[in-house]
Image (cartoon, rainbow, N blue to C red):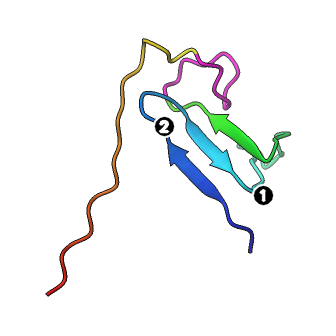
Amino acid sequence: MANVQIKVNDNGSLRVTGDVELLDGEGKPFVTKQTFSLCRCGLSNNKPFCDGSHKGRFQSVVRAPSPEPTE
């Protein structure tokens, strides 16, 4: 299985890296590269891809929770 990484960028897109197939709601594939960014603000004119429209208009910083300490 190929290694795929999705990074939640601060105040921006979801950065997808790896061998992944992106499908629309009908199951038809989008043409993608090995690395691409998906819109998560809803402002892009090129959905589902990010076009930078979020800059200065979208704020979201997401962090993974810290692991619970083990005893």
Q: Is residue 35 magenta?
A: no
- Residue at the disc numbered 1: 19
Q: Is residue 51 left or right of residue 19?
A: left
Q: Amino acid at mark 2?
A: Asn
* Residue 20: x %, y % from top left: 75, 55
Q: CA distance from mark 1 to mark 2?
A: 20 Å
Q: Residue at x 42, y 27 (%)?
A: 11
Q: Quadrant of the C terminus?
A: bottom left
Residue contact at pointers 1 and 2, CB within 8 angstroms? no
Q: Dot 2 corresponds to which residue?
A: 9
Measuring from the top left, give residue 24's x and y in whole percent: 74, 42
Residue at image coords 66%, 15%: 45
Identified by mark 1, the residue type is: Asp
- Label for residue 46? none
What residue range appears in magenta?
A: 41-52
Residue 30, given in percent of the width and then of the height, sits at: 82, 40
Q: Using a 10 Å C-alpha cutoff, classify the residue at mark 2 as few (fewer than 14 neighbours), some (14 to 19) or many (20 or more).
A: some
Determine if the magenta segment contains residue 48. yes
Relative to 70, say whether 22 is above or below: above
Residue 68: where, in percent of width, then height? 21, 72
Which residue is at 34% across, 55% downward?
Answer: 64
In front of the other: 10 or 25: 10
Q: Earlier in the sequence, mark 1 or mark 2?
A: 2
